[in-house]
Amino acid sequence: MDSAIPLARQIKVKRLNRHVITKNMGVIFSYAFLISMAVIILYPILVTLMSAFNVSNSLYSTSFFPENFSLTENFIHLFNNTPYLSWYRNTFLVSIITMILSTFIVTISGFVYSRYRYKSRKSALMSLLIIQIIPSGSGLIALYAIANSIGIYSSANATLYTYIFMILIYTTGGITMNTILMKGYYDSIPRALDESAKIDGATQLQIFKEILLPLVKPMIMVIAIFCFLGPIGDIIMPKFLIASMDSEAKTLAVGLMGLINNIKESSYNVFAAGAVLAAIPPVLVFYKFQDYIVGGLTSGGVKG
């Protein structure tokens, strides 16, 4: 009996040690995965940042900190020798207008899909899901043909009409998925609020403006941020639609890409300086509204 007790304790200790080792291994692998992902994400950012202050016209340096370091030279070259401010203005004007139009339409369409019941409702929702399956790049040729057929490129104000056309494309392109997100957020709000307001004599418009609209503010902010950031990083559609226009008529992504297209005349460090400046607004937006982004997406996924 006396020898059986230590044996039982040894077995218990071995099981405990095995549990501790297994638990620690899971923590170690989790931290290793997170650290590796952080390195993968941060390395290109650090390379771009260091290249923006390197004047040797190379994306890479023999040391982490560039030997030919300059705080202003690449940025001065960017502003003096390229229409960077015009690219900046064009891009953010498109982003702001797209954000306003898309957010307005999606807020109303999500309310309609969530609160109203009609015959074609399920078919319309299914159509939105099917549209999401189609790759956005598959319609570029058709969009160019439409723009050419309605005389955008042959008009006197070709640049203005092209940008209006792009804004309409960005606005309609973001409606499908954002409408589904907004509908899910509306669905997470109890319908008892609507019914109690109707008993008090409120109209449907009053329910939307005074009750539901303040409650869906987090999701409105999320959709507004997504719609604002979408055109900033897009290069495929602007390059396809405005490739033949003047340099000042280009967007930020297309203009910066032009700095490194020609191998013999590439300005990699000027490109990096422009990329750093272009990244400032999205970073500030995410930093300022990160609580809305996390809270809006998690709350909107409660009900479908």
Image (cartoon, grey):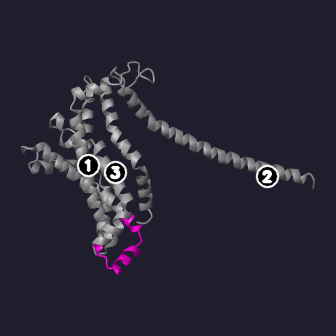
Report the residue at 13% width, 47% height from top: 161
Question: Tag 1: residue type?
Answer: Ile
Q: Is residue 169 magenta?
A: no
- Percent across and percent down for residue 286 are 39, 46
- First reached walking from the N terminus: tag 3 or tag 2: 2
Prevailing secondary structure of the magenta residues? helix
Residue beneath disc 2: 12
| Left-right relation of 60 to 170 | right
The residue singled out by tag 3 in the image is 225
Q: Secondary structure at mark 2?
A: helix
Residue 279 position (above or below residue 95):
above
Q: CA distance from mark 3 to mark 2?
A: 55 Å
Secondary structure of residue under mark 3: helix
Identify the residue shown where x is 43% and y is 20%: 62
Report the front residue among 17 and 92: 92
The mark nearer the N terminus, 1 or 2, is 2
